[in-house]
Every structure is written in C-alpha cells, then in structure tokens.
Image (cartoon, rainbow, N blue to C red):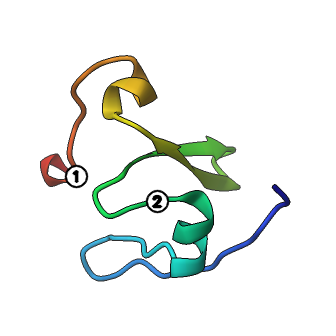
C-alpha cells in the first residue's frame, strides 16, 4: 500500500473522524478496535493508527483504558 495523507479535525469531544474512503480501504467497521500511537519528538510529534482485532492484541492484555477516564 502506498502512503496516503488524510487530514481530519478533532471535534469538540476530541474525536477524530477517519474519512469513509480510508475506512473502506482499511476494512474498518463501526466498533472496530484501533491502536493510536504517538511517536516522534516533543517538537514534532505524530500519530499512527493501526487496525486491531482487540485491545489485547494491541497491548498484550485483555483490558484497556477508555477515553472517559481522562
């Protein structure tokens, strides 16, 4: 797969919309678990998003923290 850049805005609740064409090309479905990684440097951070089957697959455990605990 080639590199594709997608731009999206955070909504007022901090949610990121992944555009439909990107969801379809990745095979993402409603409720699909994704892993969001923060990488780079303090001056130049970036996010990567990976499709996962479960939270356990992403981090090696069966539970995870939800955004409601922020």
**Point 49% across, 72% down: residue:** 18
Q: Sequence order check: which comes first, mark 2 or mark 1?
A: 2
Q: Quadrant of residue 13?
A: bottom left
Q: Quadrant of residue 57?
A: top left
36 to 54, vertically: above or below = below
**Point 77% across, 68% down: residue:** 4
Provide the secondary structure element on which disc 1 rests.
helix
Left or right of residue 29, residue 50 in this image = right
Provide the secondary structure element on which disc 2 rests.
loop
Residue nearest the observer in this picture, 53 or 64: 53
**Point 85% across, 60% down: residue:** 2
Q: Residue furthest right?
A: 2
Which of the numbered marks, if any, corresponds to residue 51?
A: none
Residue nearest the observer in this picture, 13 or 52: 52
Q: Position of residue 23 (x, y in %)?
A: 52, 68
Q: Residues within 10 Å of mark 2 (few under 14, many from 20)?
A: some
Q: Position of residue 63 (x, y in %)?
A: 21, 27
Q: Quadrant of residue 11?
A: bottom left
How many labels were placed on the picture?
Answer: 2
Residue nearest the observer in this picture, 10 or 55: 55
**Point 69% across, 44% down: residue:** 41
Q: Identify the image quadrant of the N terminus.
A: bottom right
Q: Position of residue 43 (x, y in %)?
A: 68, 54
38 to 27, vertically: above or below = above
Cα–Cα span, label 2 and label 1: 20 Å
Q: Tell me the residue that label 2 is attached to.
A: 28
Left or right of residue 45, residue 55 in this image = left
Q: Tell me the residue that label 1 is attached to.
A: 67
């Amino acid at each position: 797969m080639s590199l594709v850049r997608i731009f999206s805005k955070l909504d007022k609740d901090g949610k990121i919309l992944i555009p439909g064409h990107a969801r379809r090309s990745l095979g993402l479905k409603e409720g699909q678990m994704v892993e969001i990684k923060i990488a780079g440097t303090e001056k130049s951070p970036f996010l990567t998003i990976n499709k996962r089957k479960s939270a356990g697959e992403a981090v090696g455990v069966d539970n995870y923290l939800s955004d409601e605990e922020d």
